[in-house]
Amino acid sequence: MHGWSGRALLAAAENDETFPPEQYARLEAAYTAAGVRHTTEVCAAVHGFAVAGNATYGVAADERHRALVDSHLRSAPVTPRKVADLDFTGLGPATPSPSAWADEVLYFLLVDRFSDGREDGVRDLAGAVVAGSTPPWRPADADTAVQTDADAQAWRAAGVGWVGGTLAGVRSKLGYLARLGVTALWVSPVLRQAAPAPGAVAGTYHGYATQDFLAVDPRFGDADALRALVDDAHAAGLRVILDVVLNHAGDVFAYGGGVFDARWDGHEYPVAGWRTPAGLVPFTAEAAAAAWPDGAVHPAELHPPESFTRRGRIVDWNRYPEYVEGDFEGLKDIAQGSGGLDDYRPSPALAALTRAYCWWLASADLDGFRVDTVRHMDRGATRYFASVVHEFAQSIGKDRFLLVGEITGAREDAITTMELTGLDAALGLAEVQSRLVGAATGAEDPAGYFALFRNSELIGKDSHTWLRDTVVTGIDDHDLVRQGPVKARLGATADGRSLAVGATALTVLTLGIPCLYYGTEQQLDGTGGPPAADRYIREAMFGGEFGAFRSRGRHVFDEAGPLYTATAALLALRRAEPALRRGRQYLREISADGSVFGLPTGFGGAVRSVVGWSRVLDRREVLCAINTDPAQERTAWVTVDAGLHAVGESLALLYGSAPSQAAEVPVEARNGSAVAITLPPAAVAVYG
């Protein structure tokens, strides 16, 4: 998808003194008549359109301009309008999949909120300092955007709209990410977004309100920018997982029949028409096609009215089939098909979208998809998508293309859905995230978190490591559904900030595929309530009008920050120690006196003690320990494997967050075998 955009050609013509103004005007008119999107960075020309041979063109006086413009238009990128027109030939070589996703560490970012590429003083991939227009954030900048009611209102308002992050901006921060130690980027959806409906509180900057499934949103960049990001990421040793949406499109049509609030009641609602910038147009395939590129929904395979369920928004999020058939708030539910799991018949809409995503997979050389709102899809639809995508990926050499499903709700339901549908891993499990945070901060006994991964009848598995690469774990994310109407990052509380290194260690050194949410490594502290509470945990790292720590125009890409450096050290250790990526996992019993041992507990209150766990691979044991007390030093005897460690030998320090950490700890004959570990407040240590 390389070539000149209409904007570049028009600018060149306008600035060329030999190009008559009237010819420039005729050229612009010809672009408009032909459907060439000459006002955006994403150019879309009618396939096969040749300006020099078109009667509407008329620039015949200057053969040099005729040849130049004709040549550039023939090479201009084309946005297909139909999935059936996608060209899968010549898409380039495919990057092979990693040997094991359990070895990877994900980093989830929202494109609009990550980087615009203008930050000053950051380092590029080679480590060179880059000049820019946005200065770095300093502690004195905190709360400077909310000093007056008017300023605070403007800052909050900026948070519900587009702030300005781009794919090129993400690409400019690959060095920052590689040095942090993450190995795979989970990138929020980048396809063209629908405009918010009149009266909507929040915009569609997040990417989950798709209007055109075959085009990148021009505010993010274009298809070339996506491929350039992936190519450079691969060169830096980073994978790229794209967030994709199958369950719904954006708010692309309006309900009619005098219905003010269409709520799911099991019946179809009448539709007033497709939404376009000029207003509503008839809800027909013909009107949708005529509304391209800015109105209705695309590609053409979604134009038939039966492509959507049209049953109104979900009210009861736990009642079936309401949570499957209903609209996700204003986002319109796509009719996926019918039938049971084994005889599911995909709809033309689902088949088309699946093929479209296969095209993105190949054309951008992606390494995986994070599939949005899987709980709200038919299991048969998810299985169809997973089967087709996996098969296509294998056909081009991606044998372990990752499909991660967002499956909110109970763990047993998520695991069942994952196994029945062919997804590779699940995320969004509220109890995993809540128990991880609870264990790290001492809010609950750590046994609750570690029990999620051990043998149990619930998951019916016979291995301590079955969940190693099938569950994505993390502290924060962009929704924090588990928190209810008021959202807060871990860094929003004093204890959260103090215990952040321990929380990070618990995330990246335990079972699962760890995922860091953008900004956590800089201890962003966003918190807030309705309306649109999500905005407060989606700060712009590059600054802009909705900067972190309630600032404006200051970036937070600080590679010398304490949590960034601690995270980088922990991830370097994870890379060096196979046991920390693939080993079995055991929460260890502890003792204050070396005689009476038991699992760490707060006896109904906060857990303020050493929490230790082991990762064991073959004959190698690595012992990890955190202090969940943010204020006091704690000492405990921590049990180790007596079959692997003889009394009198010592475990060596592999990582210590505190300079005073003991360089080694001797093994003594207590509770079989145990070592005494002393940790300063909120400290982390790893021995092996």
Image (tube, rainbow, N blue to C red):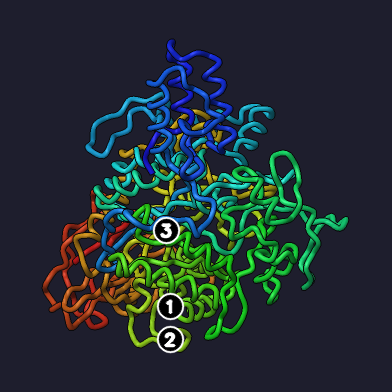
- In the figure, residue 163 lies in which quadrant? top right
Label 2 vs 1, first from the N-terminus: 1
- In the figure, residue 632 lies in which quadrant? bottom left
**Residue 212 position in % (x across, y down):** 56, 50
Specify whether 71 is left or right of 345: left
Report the residue marked by disc 3: 359
Report the residue marked by disc 1: 451
Label 1 vs 3, first from the N-terminus: 3
Task: Give, as a three-letter code, the residue at label 3.
Answer: Trp
Which-is-in-front pick, marks 2 and 1?
2
**What residue is shown at x 53% (from left), y 36% (from top)?**
36
**Residue 244 position in % (x across, y down):** 49, 58
The residue tagged with tag 1: helix, strand or loop?
Answer: loop
Which-is-in-front pick, marks 2 and 3?
3
Does residue 494 appear anywhere in the picture? no
- In the depicted view, which residue is nearer to us: 130 or 15? 15
The residue tagged with tag 2: helix, strand or loop?
Answer: loop
Q: Are marks 1 and 3 in contact (CB under 8 Å)?
A: no
Does residue 132 appear anywhere in the picture? yes
Report the residue marked by disc 2: 456
**Residue 99 position in % (x across, y down):** 25, 67
Instruction: Say if 218 sits above or below 251 in the image.
Output: above
**What residue is shown at x 68% (from left), y 70% (from top)?**
325
Q: Residue 194: which disc?
A: none
Specify whether 316 is left or right of 667: right
The residue tagged with tag 3: helix, strand or loop?
Answer: helix
Measure the C-alpha gap from mark 2 to mark 3: 40 Å
Task: Give, as a three-letter code, the residue at label 1.
Answer: Ala
Instruction: Say if 544 sits above or below 345 in the image.
Output: above
**What residue is shown at x 65% (from left), y 71% (from top)?**
324
Measure the C-alpha gap from mark 2 to mark 1: 8 Å
